[in-house]
Amino acid sequence: MKFIVQWTMRLGNDPKDNVKSSESLLKAFGTWEPPEEWTTVEFLARVDGRGGQLICETADIASIGRAVAQYVAWVDYDIIPVVDIGNNVADLFAGNAWARSAGGIG
């Protein structure tokens, strides 16, 4: 399955604390390696420095949980399972057909 792992930095009100937090995150991230269970499709950073996205494929969702757990002290996450658009369009057509029959939508 394909996932978008999206994160944003946890910024505070004190710039000194933000710099310290950023430096400690960069130090920790310097030791990180993607799990073997992942095929990384894209690894992106926001140009404003406030976060980024990783798009990966894996059959082991627990590996995403383990990777995310390493950085929750610094960042907030959204983990979004995704499918290719062609598959989703077919599902939407089927879902609409069901909604028409089940909900009396004309």
Image: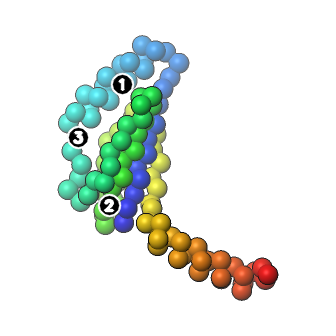
Distance from disc 2 to disc 3, alpha carbons, whole Å, reads 18 Å
Count of all numbered marks drawn on residues in the image: 3
**Type of the residue with mark 2:** Glu
Give the class, few, some or many, for how many residues have Cα within 10 Å of label 2's Cα (few <14, many ≥20). some
Residue at the spot of label 3: 32
**Type of the residue with mark 1:** Ser
Answer with left or right where residue 68 lies relative to residue 36.
right
**Whole-percent x, y for residue 36 in the image:** 20, 56
Q: Residue at x 36, y 66 (%)?
A: 1
Pointer 1 or 3: first along the chain: 1
Q: Residue at x 32, y 60 (%)?
A: 57
Q: Residue at x 59, y 77 (%)?
A: 93
**Whole-percent x, y for residue 46 in the image:** 42, 35
Q: Quadrant of the C terminus?
A: bottom right
Answer with left or right where residue 56 lies relative to residue 103.
left
Pointer 2 or 3: first along the chain: 3
**Type of the residue with mark 3:** Trp
Give the class, few, some or many, for how many residues have Cα within 10 Å of label 3's Cα (few <14, many ≥20). few
Q: Nearer the viewer, residue 3 or 73?
A: 3
Residue extending farthest to the front is: 86
Distance from disc 2 to disc 1, alpha carbons, whole Å, reads 28 Å
Q: Secondary structure at mark 1?
A: helix
> Looking at the picture, does residue 5 appear above or below residue 26?
below
Distance from disc 1 to disc 3, alpha carbons, whole Å, reads 15 Å
State the mark number for residue 62: none
Residue at the spot of label 2: 57
Give the class, few, some or many, for how many residues have Cα within 10 Å of label 1's Cα (few <14, many ≥20). some
**Whole-percent x, y for residue 52 in the image:** 40, 39
State whether residue 69 appears in this view.
no
Q: Secondary structure at mark 3?
A: loop
Residue at the spot of label 1: 22
